[in-house]
Every structure is written in C-alpha cells, then in structure tokens.
C-alpha cells in the first residue's frame, strides 16, 4: 500500500510540474481485437511511465476527424477514419514522451523492440497511436479522458453527437 500511495502522489506531483510531457496513447481497434491491450499497456508500465487515465472508448467519427485533421488531404484518410471508428479503442494518458517506444509509422521500418516493430506489419493496421507533441498529447488526453463537462464543451466545439 505504501508503494502504491507513493506512486499516486508522484503521479500528481509529476503531472503538475511544468515542462513534463504528457503523451496520449491509443490502442487502435486492431490492437484491441487482437488482444494486445495488456501487452501494450504493460510496456509503458514496465518502462516506468505513470498512467494518468485509461478508458475503453468507441471513437465517434467527428472526433476521429478532429484528431486526424492534419491528414485530411491524404489519399488514405477515408480508410483511416473507417479504421479508427471500426471498433473500440483503449485511450491511455501517460506522463512521459512515448514516441520511441511506439516506433515508426510503417511497422516494417519500426525497430525491433518497439511496439509497432514487434507487433505489427501494416501501416494501415499499426496497433497504436501516440501523440506527436506535448501540446497534442494534452489536447488528445483532454478530448477523450477528461470529465463529462469538458467532453460536452468539445462536442459543442466540433458539433458532433454526444458520446
Ligand atoms: P503516426 O501514427 O506514426 O504519428 P501519422 O500521423 O503520419 O503517423 O499517420 C497517422 C496514421 O495514419 C498512422 O498511424 C496510420 O494508421 C495511418 N497512415 C499513415 N500513413 C499511411 C499510409 N501511407 N497508408 C495507410 N495508412 C496510413
């Protein structure tokens, strides 16, 4: 009990410090369907990252479009939105920079030892998302893991249906 309350205390302390990166991780629908949620979260835990939030979530189309708005001119964009909304995802907020653990977008180019390098073969089915900057990490954590009142504000902003 001592260790876990110390850990909870540290989570809050670290999260409140300036300059500490927050990363939003999402186990994508293929990762959930393949039963890789435990394996993927375990890698962040074993590395020592502090978990800030965790949730099974059906991503509404409007939110998927908001998250991937920078890619909307890409040819694969419609497939990407279909893929992300095709089944539940698991949203995880961690306090740390996590890109190196995730690996390159194309799993065949991702280094062995990274999540994508070890667990995936296709760019279009690359099992996990990780925010690419602390700002996006914070925004994505708030969008999906924040309390209901903050989500209502987001829905109002993007004009999407409730979830
Ligand atoms: P990352 O997820 O590594 O940050 P991007 O932000 O560039 O990569 O792309 C977001 C997601 O879009 C990728 O994780 C992948 O699911 C999908 N994607 C990217 N490029 C392609 C592609 N060429 N073909 C199919 N899907 C792609």
Image: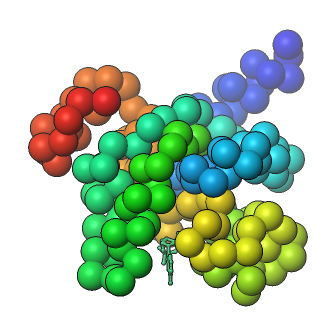
Q: What residue is drawn where x is 31% and y is 30%?
A: 163
Q: Is residue 109 visible?
A: yes
Image location of residue 129, percent across then percent down: 56, 60
Q: Is residue 25 visible?
A: no
Image location of residue 145, percent across then percent down: 45, 35
Q: Is residue 116 left or right of residue 159?
A: right
Image location of residue 62, percent across then percent down: 25, 50
Viewer-side residue, 25 vs 3: 25
Q: Is residue 67 left or right of residue 34?
A: left
Viewer-side residue, 43 vs 125: 125
Q: Is residue 59 left or right of residue 115?
A: left
Q: What residue is drawn where x is 62% and y is 59%?
A: 128
Viewer-side residue, 67 vs 97: 67
Q: Is residue 77 above or below residue 160?
A: below
Q: Is residue 139 above or below residue 143?
A: below
Q: Quadrant of the N terminus?
A: top right
Q: What residue is drawn where x is 56% and y is 72%?
A: 124
* Quadrant of the image occupied by residue 109: bottom right
Q: How is the image coloured?
A: rainbow
* Quadrant of the image occupied by residue 106: bottom right
């Amino acid at each position: 009990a001592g260790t876990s309350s110390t850990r909870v205390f540290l989570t809050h302390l670290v999260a409140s410090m300036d300059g500490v990166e927050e990363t939003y991780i999402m186990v994508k629908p293929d990762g959930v369907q393949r039963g890789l949620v435990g394996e993927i979260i375990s890698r962040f835990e074993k590395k020592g990252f502090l978990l800030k939030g965790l949730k099974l979530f059906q991503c509404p189309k409007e939110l998927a479009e908001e998250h991937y708005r920078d890619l909307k001119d890409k040819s694969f964009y419609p497939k990407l939105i279909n893929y992300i909304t095709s089944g539940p995802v698991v949203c995880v907020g961690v306090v740390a920079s996590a890109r190196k653990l995730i690996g390159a977008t194309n799993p065949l180019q991702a280094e062995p030892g990274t999540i994508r390098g070890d667990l995936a073969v296709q760019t279009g089915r690359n099992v996990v998302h990780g925010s690419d900057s602390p700002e996006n990490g914070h925004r994505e954590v708030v969008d999906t893991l924040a309390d209901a009142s903050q989500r209502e504000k987001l829905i109002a902003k993007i004009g999407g249906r409730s979830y």
